[in-house]
Amino acid sequence: QVQLVESGGGLVQAGGSLRLSCAASGSIESIHTMGWYRQVPGNQRELVAAITTAGGTKYEDFVKRRFTISRDNAKNTMDLQMNSLKPEDTAVYYCNAESSKWPYNYWGHGTHVTVSS
C-alpha cells in the first residue's frame, strides 16, 4: 500500500503563487508516474501535470508556463509550484501515484486551493 499526503494549499490572490507538496510513504518502490489532478465540485477530476521516475514531465495546456512539477525520489516527495494563479485555478488538488502493484493507482485526500480575483 501507498499513502499520499498533500500540503500547501490555501487562499491566494490572482497573480500570486502557491507551492503544493505531496509526501509518499509505504510501498514506494512500486511507484512510477506521479501527478497532480484537480477537481471543482460538479466537474470531473482532471490532470494538471505528471512526472515520471526519470523526471519526464507532462503539463496540461491550461497550466503550461505557469506551473512546474518536480519530484525528489530520495525524499519520496513531489511538488507543484504554481505561479500566476488565476481564479479558474480554484479547486481541490489531489496527488496521484501509479504503482506497478495492485491497486495500481493511489490518491491523496486533496488540498484546497482558492484564488481570489
Image (tube, grey):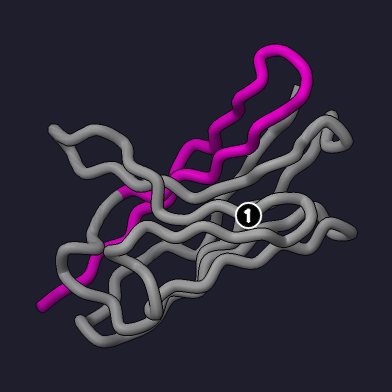
Quadrant including the C terminus: bottom left
**Residue 103 magenta:** yes
Q: Which residues are magenta?
A: 92-117
Residue plotted at (74% across, 39% down): 32
Percent coordinates x, y for residue 49 in the rendering: 48, 56
Percent coordinates x, y for residue 26 in the rendering: 82, 32
**Residue 16 magenta:** no
**Is residue 22 shown left or right of residue 82?**
right
Name the residue type under label 1.
Ile
Nearer to me, 88 or 92: 88
The residue that disc 1 covers is 51
Quadrant including the N terminus: top right
**Is residue 39 shown left or right of residue 4?**
left
How dense is the environment of label 1, judged by Cα within 10 Å: few (below 14), some, or many (20 and up)? Answer: many
**Is residue 82 shown left or right of residue 14?**
right
Give the answer, above or below, for where 64 lies relative to 36. below
Nearer to me, 75 or 73: 73
**Direction top: furthest residue:** 102
Percent coordinates x, y for residue 51 in the rendering: 63, 54
Residue plotted at (73% across, 29% down): 2
Q: Secondary structure at mark 1?
A: strand
Numbered label tally: 1
Nearer to me, 67 or 113: 67
Helix, strand or loop for the magenta stretch, by majority = strand
